[in-house]
Image (cartoon, rainbow, N blue to C red):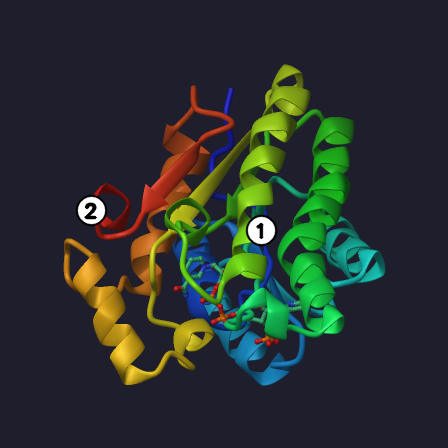
Amino acid sequence: MSITLRGSNAIVTGSSRGIGRAIALELARRGANVVVCCQSRVDAALEVKEECEAMGVRALVVQSDLATEEGCRLVADRCVKELGGVDVLVNNAGIGQFAPVHQLESEAIERTLRVNLFSYIYMSKYAVGDMIERQVPGCVINISSVVSMIGASGMSVYAASKGAITGFTVCLAREVARYGIRVNAIAPGYVETELIAPFPDDYRAKVIKRIPMRRFGEPNEIARAIPFLVEDATYMTGQTLVIDGGILIE
Ligand code: NAP
């Protein structure tokens, strides 16, 4: 048994821009109703909502700080109350800390872990709870990063949050398999979004030399894997799908 996207309800955290935006639009294109989430860019989120609605699905915007449990619960509650339940959860919201750990303030370290890791846990807690209650063979997809596998200087805290997601994905998959719920992760390589905009030109050039395909990815090249994981990968759970232009095999 698996979910059909058409008519399903999907939460995509961090979908006001970047990879999350591309995922929200891809899901809407496949007929899913979408909860578009943002922290502060409400205007951008409203544009994504309108683009989704133009494809004939229902969409709503929820603004909340996912660094808090309350912010996570709000998103799940709105999806349940306004759309009728959560069928698909894409944990995608994330922030980066591009500095060596000895130069980071504790506030920045803790916030990175709260947004990149705790929000995935709390969002899963509430979404999976709803799926189990409604006996829906739902899907959770966690956006991780290939950086936790290949290493990159100045990204240790970010990588810690992403590496933890691998363990969370594997164990949650085991916990919920009995309910027909599947949990997988995607580990993108470098993707052209605002997250990596602070990279200086010389650093970008150095990174591109490490990538066999010699370019950064585009958000929709990550988003296109989501319908595969939800609808087609019916015997796949606890796995991480690497989409990185080959950087891991270099
Ligand atoms: P992005 O363009 O910077 O977008 C980040 C999104 O997360 C925005 O929608 C932002 O909302 C939201 N967000 C940030 N902090 C939040 C908070 N406290 N509460 C709620 N929402 C919050 O990032 P991206 O590049 O698309 O990255 C998306 C995911 O892919 C992240 O998990 C990232 O680690 C992962 N990833 C990215 C790359 C890459 O190269 N870009 C590579 C590997 C993995 P606002 O718009 O309201 O600020």
Please tell me which of labels 1 and 2 falls first in the chain: 1
Q: Amino acid at mark 2?
A: Glu
Q: Nearer the viewer, residue 66 or 162?
A: 162
Local secondary structure at mark 2: loop
Image quadrant where residue 228 sits = top left
Count of numbered labels shown in the rendering: 2
Mark 1 secondary-structure assignment: helix
Does the rendering let one see residue 56? no
Q: Is the CB of the residue bearing disc 2 within 8 angstroms of ligand 1?
A: no
**Residue located 20% across and 57% down the image:** 211
Image height of 126 relative to 233, above or below? below
Mark 1 to mark 2 CA distance (whole Å) = 22 Å
Residue marked by disc 2: 250
Pick the front one: 153 or 52: 153
Label 1 sits on what residue type? Ala
Please provide percent x and percent y for residue 200: 34, 83
Residue at 60% x, 43% y is: 164
Q: Are marks 1 and 2 in contact (CB under 8 Å)?
A: no
Relative to 243, 87 lies left or right: right
Q: Nearer the viewer, residue 209 or 65?
A: 209
Residue ranking furthest to the right: 70
Q: Residue furthest left?
A: 213
Residue 206 located left or right of residue 191: left
Residue 246's label in the rendered image is none
At label 2, counting other C-alpha atoms closer than 10 Å, the crowd grade (few under 14, some 14-19, many 20 or more) is few
- In percent of width and height, residue 168 lies at 62, 36
Q: Dot 1, how many residues are within 10 Å of its Cα: few (below 14), some (14-19), or many (20+)?
A: some
Residue designated by label 1 = 160
Residue 107: x %, y % from top left: 75, 72
Residue 1 pos. (x, y %):
51, 19
